[in-house]
Amino acid sequence: MSAIALTLGPVFFHWSPDRLLDFYRRIADEAPIDRVHVGEVICGKRMPFSDPAWPEIIERLERAGKEVVLSTLAAPATVRERRSIADLCTDERLVEINDVTALPSRSGKPFVTGPFLNIYNEASARFLIQRGATTICPPVELSLAAVGAMAGACPEAEFEIFVFGRLPLALSGRCYHARIHGLHKDSCQFTCERDPDGLAVDTLDDQQFLAINGVQTLSNQVQAFCPAPADLTSKGVRRIRLSPHTCDMVEVAKTYRALADGREDPKAARFILSCLDLPGTLVDGYAHGKPGWQAAISI
């Protein structure tokens, strides 16, 4: 068994229930993923659409032998949203906490930290580990070396690094999708559903810049960090996280499984990923301690 486990993070985008069901059925049946996160993380207004689908999705994933983690909202804004987080935190499954206000509701039970929590040093990591964190996925702008330093200082927890997908950069109280369509946030008409991988944003000089997803800002480019397994294990990183997109995520998972097992070298893995229908060009600068839009390996 490989020393590196694969995690599929939560879907950031507003996908229909049918799309979610089809996506996770294929993940359950075909993807070599160890752990799968489910749940709405970005916008609580989407939850009435997706919530009815989660029980069937969870049952299908667990029947296929996947460990299911319940992901919670990263920026709860209403009493209803805070109550939904508190309810999820009582579940016996692992829960992903993306906002520190959820800690009291988890009451010391094991949990996973998502990349939305500000964990930039060993002290922050220890604070959360002492309160039940068993897996820590630090913010995406940290380098592998920085994550390794935290992992070395906190060996009692698993550390996970975000290796694939548009990078989650920020959340706002304003809905960009509503604004671009001339709507208010409260009457957004769920226009974010039109862009299932987010909406690319260019500068006035027509340079690729960012992507928007409702209240979320992401990178325009796609993170495709393809480290050799020894580079991860030497830093104490035991998990790598893939973020769902509309491309062939089964192929993405198979590519990273082969990479983690040493059956594929980093350059070949990156080439395979570049051949998929991705929403942006491949980058991995943050993982190498460089600007996030840069790519360390040319194809």
Image (cartoon, rainbow, N blue to C red):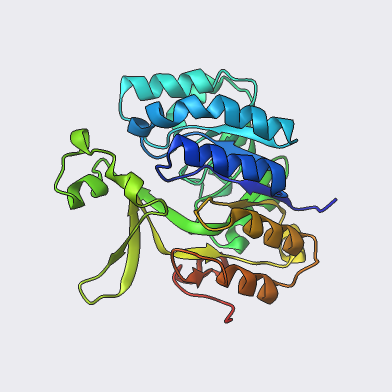
Residue located 62% across and 71% down the image: 270
Residue extending farthest to the bottom is: 298
Is residue 245 in view? yes
> Observer-nearest residue: 287 or 124?
287
**What count of labels does the image hold?**
0
> Observer-nearest residue: 175 or 154?
175
Q: In this picture, is 32 found above or below 235? A: above
Looking at the picture, how far across and down is residue 205, in whole percent? 22, 77
Looking at the picture, how far across and down is residue 111, in whole percent? 61, 31
Q: Image quadrant for the C terminus?
A: bottom right
Q: In this picture, is 273 found above or below 158? A: below
> Observer-nearest residue: 179 or 291?
179
> Observer-nearest residue: 28 or 86?
28
- The quarter holding residue 24 reads top right
- The quarter holding residue 13 reads top left
Looking at the picture, how far across and down is residue 186, in whole percent? 20, 33
Residue located 35% across and 20% down the image: 80
Looking at the picture, how far across and down is residue 266, in whole percent? 69, 72
- The quarter holding residue 264 reads bottom right
Residue located 47% across and 20% down the image: 86
Is 1 situated left or right of 216 in this image? right
Is residue 171 in view? no
Residue extending farthest to the right is: 1
Residue located 42% across and 54% down the image: 197
